[in-house]
Image (cartoon, rainbow, N blue to C red):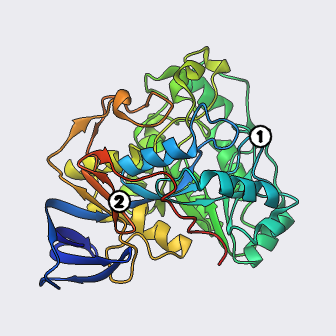
């Protein structure tokens, strides 16, 4: 297959022919490489997204989401590689559970995927199967929390990457009844305190998940950690009229902190953008605030939201592509995230004129709702994963089980 159009190449948009063969980009040039039929696109050709932080609830909570619906949502949102977190029921904290999960979800995946292991007693055995691990420093959905410093150091020494959910429970306050109250209950000081404890860890592939303030971002850098941010901490605040639907860990912060974080992202000071897609069903969230679980869906809307902000001139294309594709690919050590020779042909085709309102009923997660209802977005018209269309003209043309486990130990 050959694509022709205005493609994002080395930091800019250039008219190019992109020749694809055996799932990878064979050549990128200004002249037609062969007599093969050409798919010409009158829009923009971008690298597909890589989401390093999703919770697809499989196994254990598949009424909320499963690996098929989660990866289907990812595909429609222009994301062709995901990394799934280990706070399942049961948690992915042993080599056997990791093997069982891999066997089960691999049959459902529509796009490529990796799996995190939970840092614990069996982590070193699990590192024979995956290079990705998660530390929960406080309680959150399905996890009591805990911090195993020596195990983390051992994993880092082995070249594994470790992602940290940074909240210090000793800094938590009294339960709140609304978003501002929840922000007070789990204040930004708890995040800062948790990140500060990472400074003494040895060097290695460390990442602080979903930073929610500029101060947290700066401290994470001091701790030599990769900095991750989510769309909800960038564009939503405690003032959002979401009630329990905006309840998430760490909480939505004040509007000033939200603006500061967006400005840091705009300046390219954030390494990666992830969705922290953590769905709960509509009826689970539509309860009294204190009873509602924390978490919200977002894998399908992450890239489209950012594409709209690009079209409005609020952020540069290069900043978004770097955070959502290039840098995640580098962190995974995969030939993904760029339109370049030798890279996997993971590509989206968009038209910046196709702006629409996000509507929950048109999304593909089992959650059935979105905190971004009626936000403007630009969804990809076509999505290509490893050289094959998985979404074509906004219709799913992929299949269950197509996704490959691409981030395991080789």
In the figure, is residue 150 to the left or right of 59? right
Pointer 1: residues within 10 angstroms few (<14), some, or many (20+)? some
Of all residues, the one furthest to the right in this rendering is 121
Q: Is residue 293 left or right of residue 34?
A: right
| Residue at image location 53% in from the left, 57% down from the top | 228
Pinpoint residue 31: horizontal percent, then vertical percent: 12, 84
Q: Residue at x 69, y 67 (%)?
A: 130
| Closer-to-camera residue (36/237) | 36
Number of numbered callouts drawn: 2
Task: Find residue 323 and report its horizontal and vertical position in percent.
Answer: 42, 62
The residue indicated by pointer 2 is 320
Q: Is residue 182 left or right of residue 375?
A: right
- Between residue 291 and residue 175, name the one nearer to us: 291
Q: Position of residue 136 (x, y in %)?
A: 73, 49
- Image quadrant assignment for residue 342: bottom left
Determine the CA span between mark 1 and mark 2. 33 Å
Name the image quarter holding the C terminus. Answer: bottom right
Q: Tell me which numbered mark, 1 or 2, is placed earlier along the sequence.
A: 1
| Label 1 vs label 2, nearer the camera | 2
- Which residue shows up at 61% across the image and 40% down it? 250
**Quadrant housing the N terminus:** bottom left
Q: Is residue 399 shown above or below 233?
A: below
Q: Residues within 10 Å of mark 2 (few under 14, many from 20)?
A: many
- Dot label at residue 90: none
Choose between 287 and 381: the one closer to the eye: 381
At 43% from the left and 27% from the top, the residue drawn is: 240
| The image quarter in which residue 278 lies | top right
Element carrying mark 1:
helix
The residue carrying mark 1 is 169
- Expressed as whole percent of the image width and height from the top left, the position of residue 344 reads 40, 74
Q: Is residue 4 above or below residue 117?
A: below
* Residue 3 lies in quadrant: bottom left
């Amino acid at each position: 297959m050959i694509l022709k159009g205005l493609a994002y190449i080395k930091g800019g948009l250039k008219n190019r022919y992109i020749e694809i063969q055996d799932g990878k980009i064979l050549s990128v040039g200004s002249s037609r490489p062969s007599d093969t039929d050409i798919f010409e696109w009158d829009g923009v050709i971008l690298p597909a997204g890589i989401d390093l932080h999703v919770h697809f609830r499989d196994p254990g909570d598949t009424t909320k989401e499963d690996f098929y619906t989660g990866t289907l949502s990812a595909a429609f949102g222009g994301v062709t590689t995901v990394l799934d977190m280990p706070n399942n029921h049961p948690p992915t904290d042993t080599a056997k559970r990791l093997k069982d999960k891999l066997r089960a979800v691999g049959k459902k995946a529509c796009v490529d995927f990796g799996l995190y292991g939970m840092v614990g007693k069996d982590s070193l055995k699990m590192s024979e199967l995956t290079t990705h691990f998660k530390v929960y420093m406080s309680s959150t959905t399905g996890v009591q929390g805990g911090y195993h410093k020596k195990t983390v150091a051992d994993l880092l020494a082995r070249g594994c990457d470790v992602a940290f959910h940074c909240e210090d429970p000793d800094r938590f306050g009294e339960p709140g009844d609304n978003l501002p109250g929840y922000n007070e209950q789990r204040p930004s000081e708890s995040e800062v305190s948790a990140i500060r404890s990472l400074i003494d860890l040895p060097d290695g592939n460390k990442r602080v998940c979903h930073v929610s303030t500029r101060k947290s971002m700066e401290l994470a850098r001091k701790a030599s950690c990769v900095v991750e941010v989510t769309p909800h901490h960038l564009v939503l605040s405690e003032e959002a009229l979401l009630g329990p639907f905006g309840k998430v860990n760490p909480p939505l912060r004040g509007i000033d902190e939200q603006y500061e974080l967006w400005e840091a992202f705009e300046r390219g000071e954030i390494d990666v953008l992830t969705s922290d897609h953590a769905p709960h069903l509509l009826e689970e969230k539509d309860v009294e605030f204190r009873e509602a679980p924390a978490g919200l869906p977002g894998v399908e809307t992450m890239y489209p939201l950012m594409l709209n902000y690009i079209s409005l001139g609020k952020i540069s294309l290069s900043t978004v592509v770097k955070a959502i594709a290039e840098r995640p690919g580098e962190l995974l050590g995969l030939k993904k995230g760029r339109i370049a020779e030798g890279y996997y042909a993971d590509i989206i085709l968009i038209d910046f004129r196709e702006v629409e309102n996000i509507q929950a009923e048109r999304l593909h997660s089992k959650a059935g709702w979105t905190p971004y209802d009626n936000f403007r977005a630009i969804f990809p018209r076509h999505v290509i994963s490893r050289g094959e269309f998985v979404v074509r003209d906004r219709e799913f043309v992929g299949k269950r089980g197509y996704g490959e486990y691409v981030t395991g130990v080789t």
